[in-house]
Image (spheres, rainbow, N blue to C red):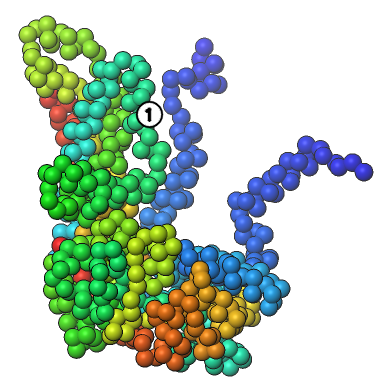
Amino acid sequence: MTLPLSRRNVLGSALTLGAMQLFPGISRAQARKLVFATFTGSWEEAHRAVLVPAFKKATGQDVLLDPMLSVDQIAKVTAARNNPPIDVMLHDPGPALAAVAQGLVEPFPHAQSANYKDLIPEAQDPNGPAMFFQVVGITYNPEKIKTPPTSWADLFKPEYKGRVGITNLNSTLGTGFLVELARMHGGSEGNVEEGFKAIERLKPNLAAVAANPGALAALFQQGQIDISPGNFNAIQLLKARGVPVEFVAPKEGAIAFRTQIEIVKNTPHKELAAKLIEVALSPEVQTRLMQAPYLVVPTNSKVKLDGEIARVLVKDVAEMKKKFVFQDWAKINEHRAAWIDRFNREIKL
Amino acid sequence: MTVATAKLPSATGYSLAFATPLAAFFVLFFVAPLLLLLVVSFYTSPELKGFGLDQYAKVATDGFTLPVLFDTLWLGVQTTLLCLVLGYALAWCYVRSPGSVQRVLMIAILMPLLTSVVVRTFAWVVILGRQGIVNAVLLDLHWIQEPLKLLYTRHGLIVVLANVQLPLMALPLITALQKLDPNLEDASAALGAGALRTFWRITLPLTVPGILAGCLLTFSASITAFISQSLIGGGQMLFMPMYIYQQASSLQNWPFAAAISLVFLVAVLGCVSLFNLVGRLSQRHATAA
């Protein structure tokens, strides 16, 4: 048999291929795989290595990871509400609530879920259960700071003049830190007046107000700052690269953000999306994600904690309730725009 | 003769037909989104409800947006002036160098353009940091006792922006200086003018088109340099690009973000027209003189 390789055939195939390249919707509309918008960086690596194979094993289906920031996930889904390009979103608590408020979320069928009831109560949310916690404590450079800090109040010590870094309120980290400062001085999620006053007092110590947590972490590498509020997982990345940094949970409690996984409304893959969440909540997947090198803090109470997480954060899931501070992000979201506005105006170095 | 011209396009004439693909591209991917932006800016609430001029009223009266806008434009002016001084000197050296040196210089000028802005900016983070090259050298020479704060300062930011945008200034200046007839400068010198006088009366006025082109490019690139501004300036310095990003992304307040984007755009267009006006006036002045 010979291939009918006429010029017309070749040209026809070439045009078809070209059209498929130009308008991928033609082919994708028929058989789009489940798309999970995870976070970039180490989260993507961890999910690709653990969650994707586990989902494949459970369902025989593939899941595509399309990592992006929470706010970009919301923007993409808002732009195409009826035919969303993402099926499952991953959000920090602020954007998770915003997505629900904007009607972008399909509730998780938790009644049919075997793993949902095993989540610690703080992780349970019918709109989108938390698949892991992000924990914020104090990051410091042990080569410069010999006595490990124990409290948020240590950031204000006069010996750290010009050594402290924070981020602005664009990030969950920056906003959570402001709220925690307010709570230390009698404020709350609804009233951060004391938090702003505290940052005002912190000014002599501030070497940098970074534009985002990533830029803040990079400042440790440059020796620009020696102590700052920091995300447990971001610190592990730096440590792995040989940067001298350590993480401590302050005695007031480490700030914990639940990272919620939500089904997108109008997804063509509702069942598969629920299945992915079920797999993500399972003790097997969460145990693997908790181990090195991922060190993702689990939410399922059946996971037995060990390794670095048990060493510096919490010994077991029961201890999470005592040692983690969960903030009320519904309250925070109400005021966040005004706080960002105020931070813009007041925090000039 | 007339038949031939009717059939074939004239070699020296121009036809808009050749511009239609690009024009279509621009209409689709630039004009249409811009109009959309305009529409969004007239919504009165972040939930995209109600039409009105509320967002523009907020820009005019909140006492914060306009100072940020002027500060951003001022940053652009400062960067452009530094860039002009450095770029003119560089272009001057280039034009007066022998061919082999020119080739090396041209690679040096173009190299930054071939590197990503992120990489260039991160290199500056390493240079300006507390343990960076500048501080290390100054400490070793015992000129300073404590590391200077260079990163996250306005001066640091201006230097970095000037470096990052320098090719945009140097290239038009080189072209302008190369087009300059060396006989004019010789004539000026022969008629008794000193080097400085020749520069002020001959070289500078005749290179005004290059200066204008360079300034326009540098100015617009430095006021919109989101990455350099946020990495070197940090989170406590707010310029328009970060402000727009914050309102659009962190706060999902699209109408206000759209309004400040358009105000920013109009302000920049205003500056560009001002540049052009100054250019035309100075050229008229040069030809009159």
Percent coordinates x, y for residue A108 in the rendering: 55, 85
Q: Is residue B269 above or below residue A81?
A: above
| Circle 1: residue type | Ile
Q: Chain of mark 1?
A: B
Can you say which quadrant of the picture contains the C terminus of chain B? top left
Q: Is residue A37 visible?
A: no
User: At numbered mark 1, what does the secondary structure look like: helix, strand or loop?
Assistant: helix
Image point 17% across, 13% down: which residue? B185
Percent coordinates x, y for residue A175 in the rendering: 29, 75
Which image quarter: residue B264?
bottom left
Q: Is residue A9 visible?
A: yes
* Residue furthest out toward the right: A1
Q: Is residue A43 above or below residue B125?
A: below
Percent coordinates x, y for residue A140 in the rendering: 29, 68
Image point 68% across, 78% down: which residue? A58
**Local crowd at mark 1 within 10 Å, few (<14), some, or many (≥20)?**
few
In the image, taking residue A49 as reference, residue B279 lies left or right, namely left
Q: Is residue A3 above or below residue A315?
A: above
Location of mark 1 (residue): B107
